Image (tube, grey):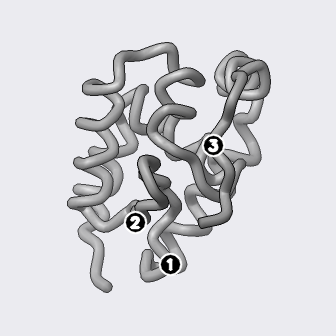
């Protein structure tokens, strides 16, 4: 997979998309409903941002029953994967409130199909 660095950095320049990416990196995989809760945003807004990241090739998705789970695309170039991991690891304080909302969420969907 080839990824245009300019488009990648533009995608990361948005607060919502970057927070979602950090959370997905930290959790490995999240459902739209989990991201909606963690980000405290409407489902359509979160879905719109996730669709942009999927279209760019940063995220991949899988359906499990009624749930759609998002993860970092395994075909993402290594430089982009490393950048996301480093950014997430070094800025965990930035998503602390989002992680707290996620951890407090009742009825999180199961990860197994």
Disc 1/disc 3 C-alpha distance (Å)? 22 Å
Circle 3 Cα neighbour tier, 10 Å, few/some/many (<14 / 14–19 / ≥20):
some
In the rendered structure, the answer to whether residue 20 lies left or right of residue 4 reads right
Task: In the rendered structure, find residue 19 and report the number of the disc placed on it.
Answer: none
Under circle 1, the secondary element is loop
**Where is residue 73 drawn, in percent x and y?**
45, 70
Circle 2 Cα neighbour tier, 10 Å, few/some/many (<14 / 14–19 / ≥20):
many
In the rendered structure, the answer to whether residue 46 lies left or right of residue 102 reads left
Mark 2 or mark 1, which has the lower sequence index? 2
| Quarter of the rendering containing residue 2 | bottom left
Under circle 3, the secondary element is loop
In the rendered structure, the answer to whether residue 106 lies left or right of residue 13 reads right
Disc 3: which residue: 109
In the picture shown, does residue 1 fall above or below 46? below
| Quarter of the rendering containing residue 29 | bottom right
**Where is residue 52 drawn, in percent x and y?**
23, 48
In the picture shown, does residue 27 fall above or below 102? below
In the picture shown, does residue 80 fall above or below 87? below
Give me the residue at 31% from left, 85% from top: 1
Task: In the rendered structure, find residue 60 and report the number of the disc placed on it.
Answer: 2
Observer-nearest residue: 76 or 105? 105
Disc 2/disc 3 C-alpha distance (Å)? 18 Å
Say if mark 2 contacts mark 1, CB within 8 Å.
Answer: yes
Observer-nearest residue: 112 or 36? 112
Circle 1 Cα neighbour tier, 10 Å, few/some/many (<14 / 14–19 / ≥20):
few
In the rendered structure, the answer to whether residue 83 lies left or right of residue 90 reads left
Disc 1: which residue: 74
């Amino acid at each position: 997979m080839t990824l245009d660095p300019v488009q990648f950095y533009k995608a990361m320049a948005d607060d919502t998309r970057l927070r979602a990416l950090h959370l997905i990196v930290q959790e490995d995989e999240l459902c739209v409903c989990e991201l909606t809760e963690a980000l405290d945003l409407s489902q359509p807004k979160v879905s719109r941002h996730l669709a942009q990241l999927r279209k760019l090739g940063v995220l991949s998705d899988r359906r499990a029953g009624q749930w759609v789970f998002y993860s970092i695309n395994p075909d993402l170039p290594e430089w982009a994967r490393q950048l996301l991991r480093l950014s997430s690891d070094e800025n965990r304080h930035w998503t602390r409130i989002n992680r707290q909302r996620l951890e407090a969420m009742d009825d999180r969907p199961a990860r197994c199909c």
